[in-house]
Each structure stands twice: as structure tokens, then as C-alpha cells.
Image: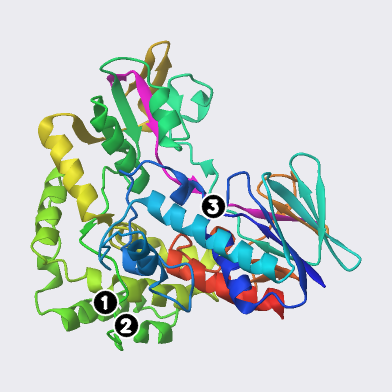
Amino acid sequence: MRSIVIIGAGAAGVSLFVHLACEGLKDTESVTLIDPNPPGRGIAFGDSNQALLCNTSAGIQSIISSAPSDFLDYCRSRGLPTKQEDYVPRALVGDYCRDRFQDCVELAVQQGIRVVHVPDRALSITPTIGGHQVSLANGGQLQCSKVAICAGLTKPRIPDGFQNYREHPRLILMPYPTADMRARIAVDEAQVLVVGSGLSAIDIAHLLCIDGYQVTMASRSGVLPAVRSRFLYNSRPFEILSQIRELSVDDPDLHNRLKHIVTAAVREIHPLPLRDQVSHAVDPLQRLREETQLAVAGLCHWQEAAYALLDIIMDWTAGVSQIMRDALLAPYRQTLWRYLGAMALPNAQRLLKHAESGLLRLTTYNPIFVRGTEEGFEVSGKRYDYVVGAAGFSAPALFRSGQQICIDDYAKGAAPVTSVGPDLRVEPNVWLAGMTNMRIPVNNFLPSTVRQAEHVAGRLLS
């Protein structure tokens, strides 16, 4: 009888458990999930604030690979008339993950299988005779036969220029849960700097503007994500995009070929030239305004190819080393970030509203000109009462120390694990899924995570 440990109980870990339960868990004695947070309540979907929206449409939020409409069915069962293209609160997806987890716990218990949630953090995995030993942060240890690492995001990136101020009382490095972040701002009519220009920064700036603070959102580049009205799977075959899989990474004309393929794919959707579907404004606020207008008018047809392009890029680069993949995609990093990680139209409209009301300012900053004071910070010559770091999160890292696999920086001096086999196995009977998967360039895309979870579930039960 096998015993399975799942490290991480966010969307990836819950999806894996649900796929295990759907397969029947034959010859399985127990499944243990290790996560400080309740199942389904990771950083991505754990915040209860209803103003925080998913960045992909409801039609692709299912955590069950064989039931792509499961999330929509869940919403409708709760009396929510959710459409495929809707951007729903992240908390709703968290509720969905939690409820599907509980459904599958009951299913497993009916089969005589023990399901346990351990509210702790896993530090390492060590092979033993007949299985593995998982060491916990509280000093405990778990014995099991198979392990799946589905660790989620936990470590916020420290913005450039603020590394020496980690303990400053007016620097908030972890913006989630947002209720805790908002409670720390104790100055009326505070001037708040949100460092970052990505999706986390957009969320935080919106909430602080709601609170009535004067908010400046700044990054080194000042570039915001593009704007899209929806992000869904498109059943169109996009045969021209499939040509990307045939490209050689050593082709000297690679960049021109890629540009031609993507442009031709967008032209298949609509004859409007790609250059007329995007804004070319330099000022970030003006670009935001123009791209919002394009999205409202239904003229950003590029968004219909985004899902397929993301999938193909992940397939194309999956077998390439991490170093080569980073070099290969380096010229496109900002473009991929802007368009594949584009912001939801409702969030763009919120930002514009705050900017036009005078509550929000968009700018750049130079990390050289960051200075902490007793009252807050001076950044590029302007004073702020508080600084909120919203530069994103670092994906969990794995290290190898002898036969031991360590998670994050548990074993100092251990060698980093930089590759994983095509079956997502990092060691015999140890697999990866979700944020720890270094085979793909974009590892926070839920449909990809769900496919990984289904694959690993099959390996755990084989």
C-alpha cells in the first residue's frame, strides 16, 4: 500500500490531489498534504478581498483536466451567472479549490484512504529503505513511499534599491494578505509608493487608492502590462503557430522567423494590422488609456492567439536547458511579459479612474536614489510615508545535497537543481508540478499547472 505526500496545497497541490481521487487511489493507504495554509488558500487565490481579480478568464480556471468547464459549473451551482470570458475574484477560485478538495477528501475516505493536512513547511526529502523521509520546519518527519513537490510562491522579491532596508518599519515587502498590508499603514492621508508595475502592483495600487491614499506606482522601466478583454482557449488550430515547434534555436534568422509567424497568426484572426491593435505611446498613462480603448472597442485581436502562443512556447522550450532558454527568450522578455501577462480590462479601467481622480501617479525610479528615513523613504527626490514592495515573487528553488533534495535555501552550499526529466521526475518516486517546474518558462499559468498535476497523478499511481 503506497503512501503519498504532496508538498504544497495551493492550486497545484489541490489539483494533483483531485486528479488522484478521480483515478481512484487504488492500493493507496494515505495522502498527506503539507502547507502552512489551508488547502486551496495559497497566495494566488487565498486573499479574501473580492476586489482582487483573476488575470485569466473564468473559462480556463478548472483544476480538473478532463472537465474544462468544472469551474463554470461550480459558479453556476452557487447561483453565479458566470460567463467564460468573465474575470472573477481570486477568492472565488480559492473557494472552488477548497470545496473540490473537500469533495475529494470525502471520496477518498469512503474508499478507506486517510487524508491529512499538515500545517507546516517541508524542508527536505531524503531517500530511505522503501521510500522517503520528509523533514518539516517544526522538526517533525514524515515517512512515505512517493512525493510530489507542488510548492507555491512564498518569497516576495525585494525591489532594487531596498535590499538594505528589509527591517525598516515603513517598508512592506509582503503585500498579502492585503488586509494585513493595509492595517500596517497608520498615517492619515499617507503618501504610498508601490514599487513594481506588474499585476501585483496593479492590485495593491487599486486597493490603496480605494483607501484614499495618494499612491505612486513606480518601477525601473515604468512599463505596464498590455490590456486585454479576455484570455481564453481558442479552438482555432493556428497551424502557422505550430511552426514554432520546428524552429531551431541555432537558426541565425530565428528572431525574424518568430516575428513573421506570430504576425501571420494574428492576421488569421482579423485583417486589422497588428500595429493598429496596440498602442505605441511612450508615456505609460497614455499607453494605458489607448490600450484600454482598444480593448473596450474589441480591437485587440492578438489576445485570441495568446493562449495558443503561450502553450507552444512552453512546448518548444521544454527540452532546452534553463540557461539556453533564458538566452533564447531574453529579446522577448518584455514583450512576453506585456502581452501574455496582460492585465484584465476591469483592472485597466480602475487604474485609469484612479489616475484621472488624482489619487494615482505612474512614474519610474532610480534604485541609486533610495534613502530610508525615520518618517519613511526618499526615492528619486520625493518623500513617501510608506513603501510597498510589489515586484512579484520568487519561484521555489530546489537544491541537492548528497541524496537529499532540499526546498529553497534549507541546506547552505547545496547544488541547485536546474533540470528535470520530461516526465517531471526529479528523483525516483519524486515528481514536480506547478511553480517548481523549471522545464517551462511560464510556470504560473493554471491550465499548464493542471496538465502537470494530471500527469504527475498518473505517475504516482503507476
**In the rendering, at what x and y percent does residue 274 appear?**
15, 71
Q: Residue at x 33, y 45 (%)?
A: 52
Residue 162 found in image quarter: top left
Q: Is residue 339 above or below residue 252?
A: above
Residue ID at (11%, 67%): 299
**Residue on which the image places disc 2:** 241
The percent position of residue 104, horizontal first and vertical second, equals 59, 65
Q: Are marks 3 and 2 in contact (CB under 8 Å)?
A: no
- Which residue is drawn at the image coordinates 42% and 10% (left, top)? 374
Observer able to see residue 345: yes
Q: Is residue 372 left or right of residue 136?
A: left
Mark 3 or mark 1: which comes first in sequence? 1
Give the extent of the magenta segment. 381-401
Q: Of tags 3 and 1, which is closer to the observer?
A: 3
Which amino acid, by three-letter code, is at mark 3? Ala
Q: Main secondary structure of the magenta part?
A: strand
- Give the residue drawn at x 38%, y 28%: 182
Q: Secondary structure at mark 1?
A: helix
Label at residue 262 = 1
Label 2's element? Answer: helix
**Figure quadrant of the C terminus:** bottom right
Q: Position of residue 148 (x, y in %)?
A: 67, 64
Identify which amino acid the numbered label 1 is placed on. Val
Against 19, residue 279 (above or below) is above
Q: Which residue is mark 3?
A: 395
Please check the rendered image and state whether residue 134 is part of the magenta-colored stretch, yes or no. no
Q: Residues within 10 Å of mark 1 (few under 14, many from 20)?
A: some
Asked if the residue under mark 1 is in contact with the one under mark 3, i.e. CB atoms within 8 Å, the reply is no
